[in-house]
Image (cartoon, rainbow, N blue to C red):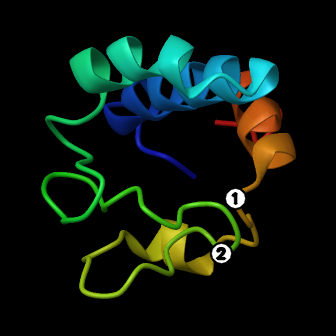
Amino acid sequence: MISHIAKPFAIALIAVAAAANAAGDAQRGQEPYESRCTACHPVDENRVGPAHRGVFGPPAGGAANYGYLDAVRASVVVWSGKSHSRAEDGLFGD
């Protein structure tokens, strides 16, 4: 379960990633990603949130050297285009 504070940020990230991924157009997603996401989620380093390079494939909570909440580490979510879309649609619950 994502905290009520973190949930809006996670949804915003997912929405931006899904919009760019849906069209397969990295340039279309670059500006929203850089303006909304990279302050907390740079591509190659952990900050407030984990780095985003390699986000598709491993299970949520699986990036090395990041202090995930227990709920994220215990989740069964594996990030992919489909799981990002499901999260954007609110299908993972509160």
Drawn side of residue 62 relative to residue 15, left or right: left
Q: Is residue 17 left or right of residue 68?
A: right
Write the residue at 29% across / 19% down: 36
* The image quarter in which residue 17 lies: top right
Q: Residue at x 25, y 77 (%)?
A: 67
Mark 1–mark 2 Cα distance, whole angstroms, equals 6 Å
* Disc 1: which residue: 79
Could you say where residue 41 lies in the image, as x and y percent from the top left?
A: 27, 47
Residue type at tag 2: Pro
Displayed quadrant of residue 66: bottom left
Q: Position of residue 31 (x, y in %)?
A: 34, 13
Q: Which residue was labeled with disc 2?
A: 59
Residue at 63 percent across and 22 percent down: it is 20
Amino acid carrying label 1: it is Trp
Q: Name the residue rendered at 78%, 18% in the picture.
A: 23
Q: From the viewer's perspective, is 48 left or right of 91?
A: left
x, y percentage for residue 82?
Answer: 86, 43
Residue situated in front as seen by the camera: 94 or 26: 26
Earlier in the chain: of badge 1 and badge 2, it is 2
Mark 2 burial class by Cα count in 10 Å: few <14, some 14-19, many 20+: some
User: Is residue 54 positioned above or below 90 on the image?
Assistant: below
Is 85 above or below relative to 74?
Answer: above
Judge whether 18 appears above or below 39 on screen. Answer: above
Circles 1 and 2 in contact, beta carbons < 8 Å: yes
Image quadrant assignment for residue 22: top right
Residue placed farthest to the bottom in the image? 64
Q: Quadrant of the C terminus?
A: top right
Q: Secondary structure at mark 1?
A: loop
Residue 77 vs residue 10: left or right?
right
Above or below for 6 versus 19: below
